[in-house]
Image: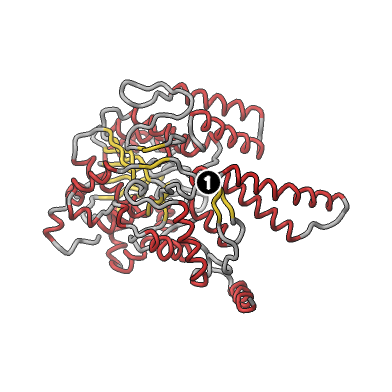
Amino acid sequence: MVKPQNRAGVSSSKVLEQLRGKHVLITGTTGFLGKVVLEKLIRAVPDIGGVHLLIRGNARHPDAHSRFLDEIATSSVFDRLRQEKGEAFNVFLDERVHCVTGEVTQPGFGLQPEALRKLAGSIDAVINSAASVNFREELDKALSINTLCLENIAELARQNPALAVVQVSTCYVNGINSGQISESVVKPAGEDIPLSPAGYYEIDELIRLLEDSIADVRSRYSGKMLERKLVKLGIREANRYGWSDTYTFTKWLGEQLLMKALDGRALTIVRPSIIESALEEPVPGWIEGVKVADAIILAYAREKVTVFPGKRSGTIDVIPVDLVANSIVLAVAEALGEPPRRRFYQCCSGSSNPVSLGEFIDHLMAEAKTNFAAYERLFYRQPVKPFIAVNRSVFDALVGGARIPLTMTQRMMRRLGMLGNERDLKVLRNLDTTRSLATIFGFYTAPDYIFHNDDLLALASRMGEVDEVLFPVDARQIDWEVYLRKIHLAGLNRFALKPRSKARLRSSRARQQAA
């Protein structure tokens, strides 16, 4: 779509050469990362043969194409392409984007056998970015989309032995392992799981045990209680084997499934750390929805959270989404051009350009203090209290100590037929919000590990200088103060949050002037 100005540069780009005329299937393009990968391929790889998108139909859009046009093609991620290319962008969508109606969790994607064979034979590579990133998902759902559905990806490879598979995983399959984390198979930190001589862990028996436990819970509960029990089951089993949550546990299981199914074939596992807004492309700050760190930022901006469990000296590993998308594109190009084997790449910042949790908080607080009014969707007013990170035991004591007397007071007032004090009720709600966020994200704000990406940087170097410019992956280019204060907060405000009503804006400005 967008051809580099220097024709010599085009011929020296290994990525563009490897992807010329090739057809790539992508899953998960209704999600944040999937959209950025799609946009990058359309804009930066003009001679790609075609992009195939597996999209589930829904009540409003029973077929993939109509859902693509309504929910994906209209995304602001493509604004740059629309502005720069106009009608040529629409022509590309018509001619080289092929939508396939299917469900990743259904056998054979829900396709007829002949349709699955046709799909497998028409593509050269598949990028699987479909996942449930809910850290506290019911175990059956997380297992289905993060683990078991990868059998469908493996089946594509069986029907097309030359197929290159790129699986998007997460650095946090590391679980509760501490120390220096390299790009390799992760050993579980909890109960033993058998290791195969081929280098992956044998999970068939574990999957059967998990499915038996799920069936047992289903036989005894229903409705909302069933959902809660399945969430608790997922957390319990994840903790037993060495993970903090169901998401990372089931993503690790998915890695093992693919390594076994595709042993000896072209399989690349790309592990991003905490993915946040774009550093540069398609525009600085582009983001969709509220991500891991943003839930805490938003709660602080709305004055619901001022204290949180965390390790100020710990490295919080954040990576902009465009660097992740570029890593995936490099991985696809390499898999298509090199002999098939198993590869791991971690897309992260912690080993090459670390930012501590304390620095992360301080940058955001400094921007909130000096420039909060520039982010009218994020900050309703200037935060008064600082955001403080404390160790977990102190946090539990603070929150528990503050909550107990307030809860007892509210109960006593209800028994006396009196309305609760609104201020106390608000404090209780904020404490509950803080505790809920801490339960979900507390593990990620107290890091005891450093992710390394030496192999990814080596891949970028092998691809050459042209591709290092076209598809940058090196986190050393990030100026954290500029990124966090001027790019990420602006992106959150512009892309992730809805505009406030004029009445609420007037009320907020009046309060600020009165203050």
Residue 191: % across, % down:
48, 24
Q: Residue at x 37, y 54 (%)?
A: 320
Q: Quadrant of the C terminus?
A: bottom right
Direction from residue 257 to residue 469 in the image, left or right:
left
Q: How is the image coloured?
A: secondary structure
Is residue 76 or residue 106 the one in the foreground?
Answer: 76
Q: Please determine whether, in this image, residue 510 is positioned above or below residue 377.
A: below
**In terms of secondary structure, where does tag 1 sit?**
helix
Q: Position of residue 291 (x, y in %)?
A: 48, 52
Left or right, residue 337 beside residue 191: left
Q: Position of residue 116 (x, y in %)?
A: 34, 37
Q: Residues within 10 Å of mark 1 (few under 14, many from 20)?
A: many
**Closest to the observer: 407 or 193?**
407
Instruction: Write the residue at 33% across / 38% down.
Output: 269
**Residue 323: percent from left, percent from top:** 32, 53
Q: Report which quarter residue 163 is drawn in.
A: top left
Residue at 63% x, 27% y is 219
Q: Could one spot residue 59 in this view of the protein?
A: yes
Q: Nearer the viewer, residue 41 or 406?
A: 406
Residue at the disc numbered 1: 441
Query: How many numbered marks appear?
Result: 1
Instruction: Check the image and name the residue furthest to the right.
Output: 416
In the rendered image, the vertical position of residue 325 relative to residue 483, given as above or below: above
Can the viewer see residue 106?
Answer: no
Q: Residue at x 44, y 23 (%)?
A: 193
Q: Residue furthest left?
A: 8
Q: Quadrant of the N terminus?
A: bottom left
Vertical order, 418 against 26 (above or below): below
**Front residue of 475 and 279:** 475
Q: Looking at numbered disc 1 in the image, what kind of residue is underneath it?
A: Phe
Position of residue 279 in the picture relative to residue 227 (left or right):
left
Relative to 7, is 117 on the left or the right? right
